[in-house]
Amino acid sequence: MLDFAILGLLREQPRHGYELKRALGELGFWQVSFGSLYPALRRLEKQGSIVGARGNGRRRSYRLTPEGRAALAHMLEDPHDGEGSERGFQLRLAFLGYLEPDLRIRVLEGRRSALVEGLLTARRSFLGARGSRTLDRYRLALMERRVHATEADIAWLDDLIAGERSNATGT
Amino acid sequence: MLDFAILGLLREQPRHGYELKRALGELGFWQVSFGSLYPALRRLEKQGSIVGARGNGRRRSYRLTPEGRAALAHMLEDPHDGEGSERGFQLRLAFLGYLEPDLRIRVLEGRRSALVEGLLTARRSFLGARGSRTLDRYRLALMERRVHATEADIAWLDDLIAGERSNATGT
DNA sequence: TAAAGCATGTAAGAGGTTACATGATTGG
DNA sequence: CCAATCATGTAACCTCTTACATGCTTTA
């Protein structure tokens, strides 16, 4: 997961560790610690996905190798996990521009299916619990929120998918 | 976090491990694995927060001790973390009914502040990125969604807080 | 009586965090 | 020149997951 994020960010431009941490935080979904970031950079370098070079001062600037680029492409295509988890999908989406246009829509629709399934489960629990008065108002509120949040996410995805389609046909 | 969830669920009624896993899943925010659940039960028993007894068949049914009840109360009051993380707050909310009524509103407002702060950050990144055209449409969509989702969460919390207030005054 | 589901448990390891240690660079 | 911030790195540990092993209980 962290490897994926690092490769994705480096595909754009070379960066050093400190900068990667900041960029990751600005993307909005990760305040990764140095204690996991630096070892990850080492690991990726040993694998040959990135190469680091000491630049001005103490900085060690990393750039993506062709192997790293291939590894990133593989992560983007492969539905290994990524789709199930929240953060995994968000990362895939952040780098979706690096995936072939005709494959992008599949990622979005995969996520949509997962959300639709989750929505059904969430609705069932909510309606069931409301009917049998099993839960207090706080847990009911939690379940209701879950239903609404998932609905909103599906609608958002539908927008993205529609945009993707009109892009594909229109151009 | 897991300990908190276990204590909260056991406060209602005694349960065995398998049942705890199901209940946790039905609450909507955790598909905990047995590999972490059973060791956690052991740990809590050693601490004296719960006691387990072999019942019919192979089941080992756990119930909360007075010490466990006190530990749960402490977790509910203490803003140790819980408020910052998504799941932490959701757990607190699920068990908020076990907290003194006059303290509940403080938990809700603590979460609200955190969300408001997050919203400001999210808005700033979004507007900044949109202005400078730094990001592609996918990352922009991600940021915009984040803003909307946070706004919706704040509105939802406001409802909960309003309900809490009318409950406090009205009764 | 076999299969499906209930139920508990352990070992290994993935993937992260916190705390600590170090030193360079920049700005007041 | 001193403080703040930039920058890298290590060690210890925590929490949870996966994979595996075991055996009971219900039901078709």
Image (spheres, coloured by chain):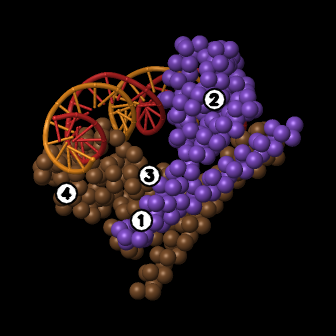
Chain colours: A brown, B purple, C orange, D red
> Contact, CB < 8 Å: mark 3 with mark 1?
no
> Contact, CB < 8 Å: mark 2 with mark 3?
no
Give how far across and how far down residue B136 sits, in percent.
38, 70
Residue position for label 4: A63
Give how far across and how far down residue A57 sits, in percent.
13, 48
Three-letter amino acid code of the residue under disc 1:
Gly
Judging from the image, mark 1 belongs to the subunit labelled B
Q: Earlier in the sequence, mark 1 or mark 2?
A: 2
Give the CA distance from mark 4 to mark 1. Answer: 26 Å
Give how far across and how far down residue B25 sits, in percent.
61, 40
Residue position for label 2: B76
Residue position for label 1: B128
Give the CA distance from mark 1 to mark 2. Answer: 38 Å
Position above or below: B95 against A75:
above
D10 or B131: nearer the eye?
A: B131
Give the CA distance from mark 2 to mark 3. Answer: 26 Å
> Contact, CB < 8 Å: mark 1 with mark 2?
no
Three-letter amino acid code of the residue under disc 4:
Arg
| Viewer-side label of 1, 2 | 1
Furthest toward the bottom, the residue is A170
Judging from the image, mark 2 belongs to the subunit labelled B
Q: Tag 4's secondary structure?
A: strand
Residue at 29% of width from left, 52% of height from top?
A20
Position above or below: A156 against A119:
below
Give the CA distance from mark 2 to mark 4. Answer: 46 Å
Residue position for label 3: A29
Mark 4 crowd level (few <14, some 14–19, many ≥20, 10 Å Cα):
many
